[in-house]
Image: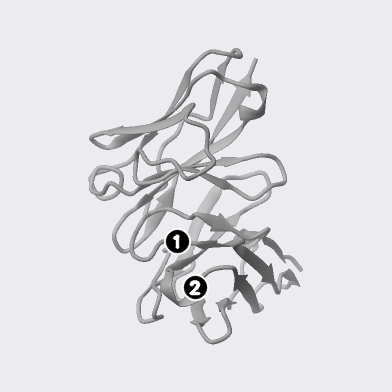
Amino acid sequence: QSALTQPPSASGSPGQSVTISCTGTSSDVGGYNYVSWYQQHPGKAPKLMIYEVIKRPSGVPDRFSGSKSGNTASLTVSGLQAEDEADYYCASYAGSAEAFGGGTKLTVL
Amino acid sequence: EVQLVESGGGVVQPGGSLRLSCAASGFIFSRYWLHWVRQAPGKGLVWVSRMNSDGRSTSYADSVKGRFTISRDNAKNTLYLQMNGLKGEDTAVYYCARGGYDASGSYGDWGQGTLVTVSS
């Protein structure tokens, strides 16, 4: 069971777009369309932003979108806003287990 | 409104035991997979364990296998995590999270977490 690989940090100016990657293997990200993304502000519980690779829960702005190619999933945040500054985590079903990425700190410049 | 409320955290010595509980409300508890996820201070999220809706199937992270046991009481709408043989590296905030009706790789709702500190 290995953690998924995310860049430790990402940044962008207000209004810009930023993409965060999440790399796994054919046993997790590449093997299932069960990748999800979470936003976590300091001291708060995580919040589901994307599930099943591309789906957005009710209430999540359409500025957040997900995609996947092979063993790598991506979260794109368009039209960056100050409140998007947070830690972002990917997660994937992996059959007999599940895995999270190490997290990416998104800074809005 | 979905609510998940964890309890049972605290300070325990290495080798000790704790039982965490997660009281759920606002949804049909018996229909959902449930998970425990932990976060060490200043670190990232780590999946710990899951149980399917009827309680017949469980899975664990390698790091806790053989020491932790997940269970649920669908009559009491409560999820549990029995933690034995605790180690310093188990120190973390433990969250319970609601999964889907089946395997989904997603956690739609989270509790506020309960802090477990393993220290002598």
What chain letter is assigned to the residue under label 1? B
Across and down, in percent, residue B4 comes to 62, 65
The amino acid marked with disc number 2 is Ile
Q: How many marks?
A: 2
Residue at image x 60%, y 71%?
Answer: B24
Residue A25: image quadrant is top left
Residue at image x 50%, y 78%?
Answer: B69
**Element assignment for label 1:** loop
Q: Nearer the viewer, residue B35 or A4?
A: B35
> Do the residues under discs 1 and 2 have CB atoms within 8 angstroms?
no
The amino acid marked with disc number 1 is Gly
Q: Nearer the viewer, residue B119 or A85?
A: A85
Residue reaching furthest to the bottom? B75
Q: Label 2: few (<14), some or many (≥20) within 10 Å?
A: few
Across and down, in percent, residue B97 comes to 53, 61
What chain letter is assigned to the residue under label 2? B
Query: In the rendering, which numbered label is found on residue B99?
Result: 1
Residue A4: image quadrant is top left
Colour scheme of the picture: one colour
Whichever of labels 1 and 2 marks the residue nearer the N terminus, that label is 2
Q: Quadrant of the N terminus of chain A?
A: bottom left
In-image side of A25 versus B55 (left or right): left
**Element assignment for label 2:** loop
Query: In the rendering, which numbered label is found on residue B28?
Result: 2
Q: Quadrant of the C terminus of chain A?
A: top right
**Mark 1 and mark 2 on one chain:** yes
In-image side of B105 versus B63 (left or right): left
Q: Nearer the viewer, residue B45 or B85?
A: B45
Query: In the rendering, which numbered label is found on residue B61?
Result: none
Relative vertical location of residue B76 with respect to residue A96 in this rendering, above or below: below
